[in-house]
Image: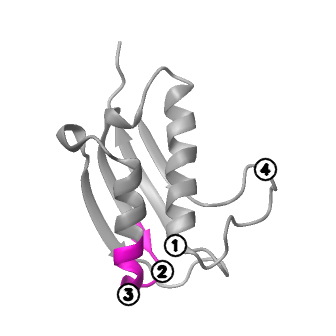
């Protein structure tokens, strides 16, 4: 399964960005959205094999990485990851993810 353009846009308040400017909160929220999508098809974060992360400012990498590692806790199943600077997103947005997950039968 391929998920592209996963972002911290609010599901609860359409048209808004969750926690503007806070990369840790946005990373947690975005991965929580991914987890919901995976659970809806009987999957989990353990099914994720590759993540490409785009962040607005590489000086925030440590905050991003900490939040990312809080969500992907299974060291034996941690996905491969590439993190890239993305330049400017919408005002207040700090992170966007592209994800590949394996579908289980």
Pointers 3 and 1 in contact (C-beta within 8 Å) = no
Residue located 21% across and 44% down the image: 75
**Quadrant location of the N terminus?**
top left
> Badge 3: how crowded within 10 Å, few (<14), some, or many (20+)?
few
Pointers 1 and 2 in contact (C-beta within 8 Å) = yes
Pointers 3 and 2 in contact (C-beta within 8 Å) = no
> Badge 4: how crowded within 10 Å, few (<14), some, or many (20+)?
few
66 part of magenta stretch: no
Label located before the other in sequence (1 or 2):
1
Separation of marks 3 and 2 at Cα, in angstroms: 9 Å
Name the spot of residue 98 as percent of width and height, x first: 42, 54
Of discs 3 and 2, which sits in the foreground? 3
Q: Nearer the viewer, residue 52 or 44?
A: 44
Q: Please provide the residue range marked out in magenta.
A: 54-63
Name the spot of residue 68 as percent of width and height, x first: 39, 58
Label located before the other in sequence (4 or 3):
4
Q: What number is the disc on residue 23? A: 1
Pointers 1 and 4 in contact (C-beta within 8 Å) = no
Main SS, magenta region, reads helix
Residue that badge 3 annotates: 59
Label located before the other in sequence (1 or 4):
4
**Quadrant location of the C terminus?**
top left
Residue that badge 2 annotates: 56
């Amino acid at each position: 399964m391929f998920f592209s353009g996963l972002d911290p846009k609010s599901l609860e308040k359409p048209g808004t960005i969750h926690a503007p400017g806070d990369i840790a909160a946005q990373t947690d929220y975005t991965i929580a959205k991914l987890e919901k999508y995976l659970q809806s098809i009987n999957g989990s974060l353990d099914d994720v094999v590759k993540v490409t992360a785009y962040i607005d400012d590489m000086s925030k990498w440590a905050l991003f990485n900490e939040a990312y590692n809080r969500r992907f806790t299974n060291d034996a199943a941690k996905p491969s990851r590439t993190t890239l600077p993305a330049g400017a997103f919408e005002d207040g947005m700090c992170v966007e993810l592209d994800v590949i997950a394996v579908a289980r039968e």
